[in-house]
Image (cartoon, rainbow, N blue to C red):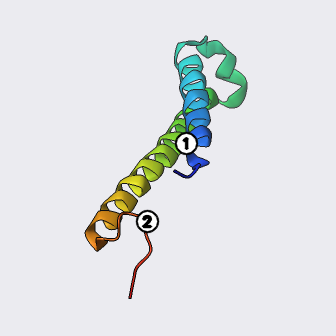
Amino acid sequence: MQFDLRVPIGALFTLYGVLLALYGAFSDHTQYARSLGININLAWGLVLLLFGVGLLWACFRGRARDRGAGSEQGNGGNGVQRR
């Protein structure tokens, strides 16, 4: 089993994205008057959330593909092709 760095980074970005999006959604909207009414906390929270979920999705998709490819080749799942 290999360590995949996408899991902790994806989880961290997902957590930060959820927290920032919730803050942007439920905070006082009068504080955004200085930024032309743009709720930047909500916008960047959603960006971080999508990035984190994308990393997690790519990780689990890659693991499933590796697992399937190893069993199809009939080599015990070690990913090494024999000639």
34 up-or-down from 12: above or below: above
Q: Amino acid at mark 1?
A: Val
Q: Residue at x 57, y 31 (%)?
A: 17
Q: Label 2 neighbourhood size at 10 Å, few (<14), some (14-19), many (20+)?
A: few
Q: Left of 35 or right of it: where is 26?
A: left
Q: Residue at x 53, y 13 (%)?
A: 26
21 up-or-down from 51: above or below: above
- Judge depth for marks 2 and 1 and give the one in front: 2
Across and down, in percent, residue 69 comes to: 33, 66
The picture quadrant where one finds residue 30 is top right
12 up-or-down from 24: above or below: below
- Determine whether the residue tagged by mark 2 lies in a helix, strand or loop: loop
Q: Is residue 23 visible?
A: yes
Q: Residue at x 49, y 41 (%)?
A: 50
Q: Nearer the viewer, residue 81 or 57?
A: 81
The image's mark for residue 78 is 2
Q: Name the residue that disc number 1 marks.
A: 7
Q: Amino acid at mark 2?
A: Asn
Mark with earlier residue (2, 1): 1
Across and down, in percent, residue 14 comes to: 54, 33
Compute the Cα span from label 2 to label 1.
22 Å
